[in-house]
Amino acid sequence: MAAGRDLTVDLAELRTLRLRVQGLRAPFDASGPEVVRRFAAVQAQEFLPAQWGLAARVPHDRRPDAATLAAALDDGGILRTHVLRPTWHFLHPDDARWIMEVSAERVYGASRTYIRRSGLEGETGTRGLAIVAASLEGGHRTRAELTAALEAGGLPLTGLAFTYVLMLAELERVAISGANAGKQRTYAAFDERVPPSAPRPREEALAELAARFIASRGPVTERDFAAWSGFTLGDARRAFADAADPEGLGGGRIEELEVDGAAHVLDAATVASLEPAEPVSDAAAPVVDLLQAYDEYIMGYAPPRSYLQPPGRSDPVHPEFPLHALVIDGTMAGRWAPVVEAKRARVRIVPWREFTPAEERALAASVAEVERFLGQPVTVEREPIPSA
């Protein structure tokens, strides 16, 4: 697939590369919106933890706190909608239109059964979209306000039917995330928040999505891209080939390397920037990453995610909300959860093993970063290590 040197790396080197490419080591993105732009789409079911995942990828001296990222979401510098597999994702406004367009066919395919069961095929769905669009012309609307608008329009929808009329509104580029109304999230008119752009051919859009995926998450495989994006493996293979073709849609920035006998690819410019770095050694100071359960360091790759496995554990790592991922030097070492209250917050730590003194110091530093992000005092609660 790629021109250039043949590279062979082991799992430790793979972790080092991915942590640096993802910006979890020596962060280089200027802001939360720039993280989202570079990643193309960032999984964001858990609203506040997902924002922490953006902040962790910005250099310490300019790292945004929760209030700053909330303002970016309110202002539309970061958007949140259902896309790709589908699930909630952050999108940059400059990318939202074309990513939604290329993803819509697959999302419709995954959702069609539920749309039909909700009675939203045909005229009912069309009426629902028209009512939602008309309501959003008057400003940003909460779910309760949209429910009332539908009822006033003679289409009272609740439960799954209401959920899927909003999904249709997102798929049809009628609605996208708006500014928060107090603690309630809202929907806004899509065209208000997303700048106009010309439609892109499907293969061109997939090639760019693949190129951006490789550049922000490499080393990766076609299977990783298929699992992350929701597209078929055939689509992933074609998109990777287009991304790697110097004369093609992706511009040919791709270099191939081998990890445990499996072919992976990495953005060639990223390879050049990472060449001076050495893999993490046993003697190096440990780094603790408190990642959200759906962080791109986890969900950007297909199961079983063996790079995450610590010594002595062979079971695949899965998201486990409300607990998130406590990672030491790129491998799982436990779970954690932020519990945010009105004037204080708790960080719950669920270790899988004893931590060394250096790891304890690294954990304390990471908790301090979470406290700084939240802008309120944090109390640490620690559960006992599970017995073998």
Image (cartoon, grey):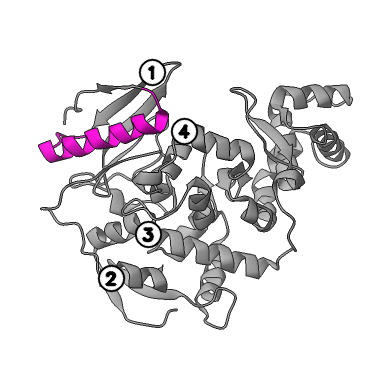
> Judging from the image, what secondary structure is the residue with disc 4 in?
helix
> Judging from the image, what secondary structure is the residue with disc 3 in?
helix
Sequence-wise, the earlier of marks 2 and 4 is 4
Which amino acid type is marked by label 2? Glu
Residue 223 in view:
no
Residue holding disc 2: 275
> Judging from the image, what secondary structure is the residue with disc 1 in?
loop
The x and y percentages for residue 294 are 44, 42
Residue holding disc 1: 344
Q: Is residue 76 left or right of residue 49?
A: right
Q: Residues within 10 Å of mark 4 (few under 14, many from 20)?
A: some
Which amino acid type is marked by label 1? Arg
Residue holding disc 4: 66
Spatial separation of the CA atoms under disc 4 and disc 1? 14 Å
Q: Which residues are magenta?
A: 352-376
Report the residue at 41% width, 63% height from top.
Answer: 220
Sequence-wise, the earlier of marks 3 and 1 is 3
Q: Is residue 329 magenta?
A: no
Report the residue at 69% width, 29% height from top.
Answer: 160
Q: Contact (CB < 8 A) between labels 3 and 2?
A: no
Sequence-wise, the earlier of marks 4 and 3 is 3
Residue holding disc 3: 21
Residue 358 sits above or below residue 258 on the image: above
Q: Residues within 10 Å of mark 1 (few under 14, many from 20)?
A: some
